[in-house]
Amino acid sequence: MALTINNLSKQFAGFAALNDISFSVKEGEFIALLGPSGSGKTTLLRMLAGLDYPDKGTIDFKGQNYLSLPVKERKIGMVFQSYALFRHMTVAKNIAFGLEMRGKNKPKREEINETITRLLKLVQLEGFEKRYPAQLSGGQRQRVALARALAINPSLLLLDEPFGALDAMVRKELRRWLRHIHDETGLTTIFVTHDQEEALDLADRIVLLEGGKIAQYDTADKIINHPKSEFVFDFVGSGNAADADIKGEIASINGCEFPVVNLTNFSGRQKVKFRNYDALISNEEKGIKAQLTGIFASTGFLRFEAIDNGGHHLEIIIPERNFDHSLKVGDRVGILPQKAYLF
Amino acid sequence: MRRKSAKSPQNIADYTLILFAFFWMALIIFLPLASVLFNAFKGGVSKYLETFADPDAMDALKLTLLVTAIVLPLNIVFGIASAWAITRFEFVGKTILLSIIDLPFSLSPVISGLVWVLMFGAQGWFGEFLQAHDIDVIYALPGIVLATLLVTLPFVARELIPLMDDNGTDEEVAAVTLGASGWDVFFRITLPNIKWALLYGVLLCMARAMGEFGAVSVVSGHIRGLTNTLPLHIEVAYNEYNTIGAFGAATILVGLAFVTLAIKTILEWRYADELSAQHRH
């Protein structure tokens, strides 16, 4: 294990920002710290960087006690949501800054210049040496910020909501590109985000935080298909709730039987949850009886809104090619869950 | 060059407004300044030049420059330190500190002088102690410096606080993660980012330090050749019907104001590229 975090806790004015956090990261792994605001993800990242300290717990990086090392000795490359580029310096000087700060171990001028050229090539900004940050777009600035962080040859790369200030298109593009750079450099990387799509798409494993505690630490596949709690289920996607009769791993609603991932020992009538894509719509009187209140087209699928007899809203998405074109708004339908969860 | 939303004037109303601005400037600023020059040269160039041969006037000029030279560095240090404290930390009493920094703006200069007399004058709190140890504060250089210091205290801090607040701490934190020491962070990141605001603050502070009349008048005692600053000297000369002497000395103050303005303009022109590059967001 490259990074091991044990029992990390931190109180801020009476409330627990971090509550007994423990997890470990393998060398070269790409980890996302995911959670809603106030879940403690940024606090955790700042502790790794040495900008904040826990009340309790340890951080061990490759056998070193990180908490005893000051910021500058941790060799961390950090990227901020606000880019935090030095506005009075050119792109080249920004990138060189970490090397200039080495005092007696400062590399020779030619070496620094080589590093600048190499990194600008890596972040695809060749020829931008003499520009000032204000003359760059948001995406370009964040790429310079990454080059600056990589210049000191860090042993750990930390990114704090790196794409938070960018628009959707640039976000997606930079996301793939960051993953590419990670795979090329093999650098152990930890990034903070509140965007579950970004985390699921990008990270090898995800630390999903809830109120300062780890809700689940798993791969994207496990988090999507085997959520450990209702919070995890709700945070990573949308879903519906319904009452069903539970018998072990099988649930049934009004003649419709479907498998249920049962995380409890309950049986009998229980509230289950199912994903909006884990259901079919039938015109038979089976499953959840409901009335269609809306049909919306999207790229490749259709989204249905319905209301059940108890007045609860339901949302179902179905691939366009599987769509039964006879369905209309106002129709009485049966919604048939295909897979559900009992928390 | 931050925003180019201004257009050229189009109709009579636009031109009237521009004309009015010029007219008002001429009336309020240019005319009085012209009268200074007019009165100073009323008796001819040689009479005017006699001002510079007057030892009292020259002593007053020297004292004014000396006081400014003492007050300026102190205000720079205080201004940066307080702006740093206020924008970089959360602490109890922050709002109180902010209001106290502003106080000299709303305080009458006479009060700013009088408080020092009440503290260090013969009848003041520390009067006896000072007399016993033979230390002159009031009617001497230290009193003039203290009065000027109080009046000019907000200038540097007030320029820096909004800017440093706006800039935030991210750049400084980034520098720390890249291995910069506290010293490096200040001189390579913080200072370059605030240097223009600092310069404006310094120029404003300088102009006020050289021109302060009220507060200095209370503590100075108007001793010719000793505690008369240039503004005080002008008043004395004017009261003695030495119009040419008074307006001659006034041209020196006006000259210093123009030098200050010129420095600012030249620096802005010289670094125009850098300025616009940094501000365009």
Image (tube, rainbow, N blue to C red):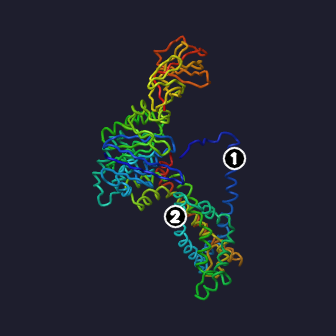
| Image-based side of B73 in relation to B235, left or right | left
Sooner in the amino-acid sequence: mark 2 or mark 1: 1
**Residue type at tag 2:** Ala
Q: Is residue B74 above or below residue B278?
A: below
Q: x and y percent of residue A130 in the render?
A: 39, 47
* Residue B26 % position (x, y): 68, 57
Residue at the image point whose x is 49% and y is 26% from the top: A274
Give residue A249's quadrant in the image.
top left
- Camera sees residue A180: yes
Location of residue B33 with respect to A248 vertically, above or below: below
Which residue is under mark 1? Answer: B17
Q: Which mark is on residue B61? A: none
* Front residue of this view, candidates A174 and A125: A174
- Work out whether residue B19 or residue A311 is closer to the camera in this orientation and state it: A311
Residue B156 quadrant: bottom right
Screen quadrant of the N terminus of chain A:
top left
Q: Secondary structure at mark 1?
A: helix
Label 1: chain? B
Q: Which residue is mark 2?
A: B81
Q: Secondary structure at mark 2?
A: helix
Q: Residue at x 52, y 66 (%)?
A: B76
Where is residue A265 drawn, in percent x and y? 46, 31
Choose mark 2 or mark 1, whichever is in front.
2
The chain that hosts pointer 2 is B
Q: Give the alpha-carbon distance from disc 2 to disc 1, as whole Å.
A: 43 Å
Question: Along the horizontal axis of the image, is A184 left or right of A339?
Answer: left
Residue B254 sits in quarter? bottom right
Q: Measuring from the top left, give residue B81's x and y in whole percent.
A: 52, 64
Q: Of residues A272 and B243, which is closer to you in this image?
A: A272
Q: How many numbered marks are there? A: 2
- Mark 1 neighbour class, 10 Å CA radius: few under 14, some 14 to 19, many 20 or more: few
Specify the amino acid type for callout 1: Leu
